[in-house]
Image: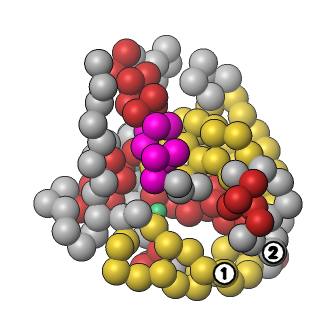
Amino acid sequence: MNLTLNLVTVEHSEHKALLRQKTAQIPFPLSPEIQQLIRAMKEKVMALGGVGLAAPQVGHALNLCVYVISEKAKLRRADAAETIPLTVLINASYEPLFGATEKKCDDWESCFSVTSTSKKVARYRRIKYTAQDELGNTIKGIAKGFTARVLQHEIDHLNGVLIIDL
Ligand code: NI
């Protein structure tokens, strides 16, 4: 069965309040419905040609996002140092690597849920993040540069924060 996902936007969607909610933690093992949602989100982010997609953007207030940095996306950013395969993050959070002393840098961002604008957003250069994979294993990592930017953007969605707030 295919799940059709429609994008929720702040400008047009009747469900836009979803974008402002703090999302719910997801229990393990994943239900068949969540597994189906994850498959559909992977397909959607690839179909959109995006670097990330968070569950609230497709109508679900769940702590779940997918991200991917293709070679093409990497080439567009001076601070992109790596490609990342399509990855699922569940129950994700992040913090700046060295707390309040971690530096931020500005760069352009756009968002499928904010169709009216692209803007420069100040993001931490380095973060540490934690999440779970689809089996419930803990994922911990340090991300830098563009990867850190993408993760901050997507995990912010899981806390109801959009680029227009920053
Ligand atoms: Ni976004």
Q: Dominant secondary structure of the magenta stretch?
A: helix
Label 2 secondary element: loop
Per the image, the residue denoted by label 1 is 107
Residue visible at 69% across and 52% down in the picture: 69
Tell me the crowding category of disc 2: few under 14, some 14 to 19, or many 20 or more residues within 10 angstroms, Cα based.
few
Query: In this orientation, which residue lies closer to the viewer: 43 or 26?
Result: 43
Q: Position of residue 142 (x, y in %)?
A: 81, 51
Q: Please give the label number shown on residue 78.
A: 2
Specify start and end residues of the magenta stretch as a single range: 41-48
Q: Position of residue 90 (x, y in %)?
A: 54, 36
Q: Position of residue 66 (x, y in %)?
A: 55, 43
Q: Is residue 98 above or below residue 31?
A: below
Q: Is residue 143 above or below residue 117?
A: above
Q: Of label 1 and label 2, which has the lower sequence position? A: 2
What is the three-letter code of the residue carrying label 2? Ala
Q: Is residue 115 above or below residue 140?
A: below
Give the CA distance from mark 1 to mark 2: 10 Å
What is the three-letter code of the residue carrying label 1? Asp
